[in-house]
Amino acid sequence: MQDHGIKFGLEYLGMRTMLNQNRYPFISTMEECRDLIATTGQQNVGFVLDSFHWYCANENIEDIRSLSPSEVVVVDINDARSGFTRETQVDGKRELPLATGVIDLKSFLQGLVDIGYDGPVRTEPFNQELNQMDDAPALQTNMKAIRKALALLG
């Protein structure tokens, strides 16, 4: 892939609910994922950095500031469900950015600005209401949420 200019992104899964779900826990923090990426020895492997997993792993803006922009392949912005603690959030149930205000998306995005990240940003909500929409309204709803999130930066 590297010979063709393709980057490969790895995503850590920060939900505490997944740590005890299987026989072997998966990588659940930025630091663990950074170690895995380094172990590959490949220059084209980096992070899929997701605000939901960042939040669930109890990470902060300083964790993002520890990255170089070249370490980030793509960014997912989401919000977490209200009424659940960070330890009880479940993968596959997320909200559009700023829908609940549970995740400090301003700090997440500011960290990316601070390191000079200029790559793709997308939503990844696992949301029944959004899934039931036709494609065009779902896209408009996503775009509105992305624009609202990016407006946090001024």
Image (cartoon, grey):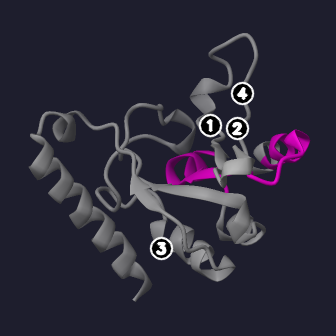
State the CA–CA distance, disc 2 to disc 3. 22 Å
Q: Residue under circle 1?
A: 13
The reply to whether the magenta stretch includes residue 81 is no
On the image, the x and y values in percent for residue 80 come to: 41, 48
Earlier-in-chain disc, 2 versus 3: 2
Stretch in magenta: 34-59
Type of residue at label 3?
A: Lys
* Circle 2 SS class: loop
Type of residue at label 1?
A: Leu
Residue at x 32% of width, y 56% of height: 100
State the CA–CA distance, disc 1 to disc 4. 7 Å
Type of residue at label 2?
A: Ser
State the CA–CA distance, disc 2 to disc 1. 5 Å
State the CA–CA distance, disc 3 to disc 1. 21 Å
Other residues around mark 1 within 10 Å, as few (<14) / some (14–19) / many (≥20)? many
On the image, the x and y values in percent for residue 29 come to: 73, 45
Other residues around mark 3 within 10 Å, as few (<14) / some (14–19) / many (≥20)? some
Earlier-in-chain disc, 2 versus 1: 1
Type of residue at label 4?
A: Phe
Residue at x 28% of width, y 57% of height: 99
* Circle 3 SS class: helix
Q: Residue under circle 2?
A: 28
Mark 2 and mark 3 residues within 8 Å of each other at the beta carbon: no
Q: Is residue 88 left or right of residue 45?
A: left
Query: In this picture, is 87 found above or below 73?
Result: above
Q: Residue under circle 3?
A: 106
Q: Is residue 58 visible?
A: no
